[in-house]
Image (cartoon, rainbow, N blue to C red):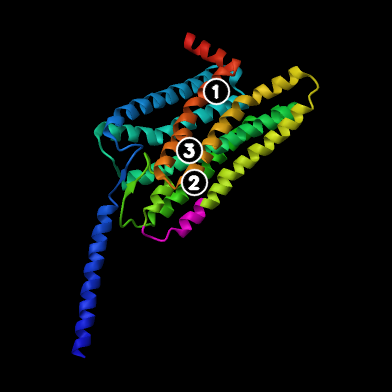
Amino acid sequence: MLANVKICFSFLLFSDSHLQQKESYNGTQLSEFLLLGLSQALERQSLIYGLFLSMYLATVIGNLLIILAVSSDSHLHTPMYFFLSNLSLVDICFTSTTIPKMLWNIQTQSKVITYEGCITQMYFFILFAVVDSLILTIMAYDRFVAICHPLHYIVIMNPRLCGLLVLVSWMMSALNSLLHSLMVLRLSFCSDLEIPHFFCEFNQVVQLSCSDTFLNHMIMYFSAGLLGGGPLAGILYSYSKILSSICGIPSAHGKYKAFSTCASHLLVVSLFYGTALGVYLSYTATHSSHSSATASVMYTVVTSMLNPFIYSLRNKDIKRALESFLGR
């Protein structure tokens, strides 16, 4: 009897000390993460800093000019340019979620990001990525209506519908990113807290958890299919109808004019989804977090930087508005 009491007492002492140690360990671990960035080599940090600073400034200035040009020219107050200005705003926010923190860490020679900062960065990254995808889908629908139903375009794409489509996109994205963030908050992190990325990428953070992440992955796959695959399917459907309508136009000039209104948007869509798919394939093929981080630069930074150039170089209305705005 006495032996059993001693065993139970020893077990309780061990359990209590183990629990206290785990709580203290988790409390320390949950205070911060480490962002390993794109390269560990010190001699490359200056090059990476200069390159990303240049791309970030080009992204902000280019997209800001698009917004100012559209807002200052009354001829551009149409659904197509309304959606374009919203896309430019989202691109500025998208890159501002990750790049400034990366540049700050390089400047201060620190890899630390707080637990709260990581969750916040993850929330806004998912938010703006999904809004970007949905606005690209809305723009495809706008082109579909303009080419396939030109006589009803003004009636269908009225200001109320345009505003409602953008508002719903923001609301859906906000709810989706909130769900993902809350699901991460329930996880515990007991071991390695080094993130092999230059920002708190959702999948990389979840992989660091010592909790059961089955539900997180299920929600991630479901939302990716719904808010990633769904918009892509909508874009492909819209362009299949657009292509069918263009083929039915008798004159070559009419076909060229109809296609030219879609060329810029189609190129942006190809860049966004092509690079995002490339990130996924590079990770599944090599299982290398470093190669995935390098590939993700394309859709997180490069695509947002190129969007203003694509739309301004191929669009006479945007070029005229920019010249008029800068001429002031």
Residue 146, quarter of the rendered image: top right
Instruction: Report crowding for label 1: few under 14, some 14 to 19, many 20 or more residues within 10 A (C-alpha).
Output: some
Contact between labelled residues 3 and 2, with CB atoms less than 8 Å apart: no
Disc 3, SS = helix
Task: Tell which of 282 and 322 is nearer to you.
Answer: 282
Q: CA distance from mark 2 to mark 3?
A: 27 Å
Please tell me whether mark 2 sits on a helix, a strand or a loop. Answer: helix
Identify residue for label 2: 285
Sequence-first disc among 3 and 1: 3
The span shown in magenta is 210-220
- Residue 139 rendering spot, x and y as whole percentages: 61, 32
103 left or right, relative to 266: left
Q: Measuring from the top left, give residue 254's x and y in whole percent.
A: 75, 19
Toward the viewer: 192 or 161?
Answer: 192
Disc 3 or disc 1, which is closer to the eye?
1
Q: Name the amino acid type tagged 1.
A: Ile
Q: Residues within 10 Å of mark 2 (few under 14, many from 20)?
A: few
Name the disc covering residue 81, or none: none
Q: Which residue is mark 3?
A: 128
Number of numbered discs visible in the structure rendering:
3
Give the left or right position of residue 217, taking residue 39 as reference.
Answer: right
Instruction: Give the labeled residue for mark 1.
Output: 310
Check if mark 1's residue and mark 2's residue have beta carbons within 8 Å.
no
Label 1 element class: helix
| Relative image position of residue 138 (x, y in whole percent) | 61, 35
Which secondary structure is most common in the magenta stretch? helix
Mark nearer the viewer, 1 or 2:
2
Whether the magenta-drawn stretch holds residue 219 is answered as: yes
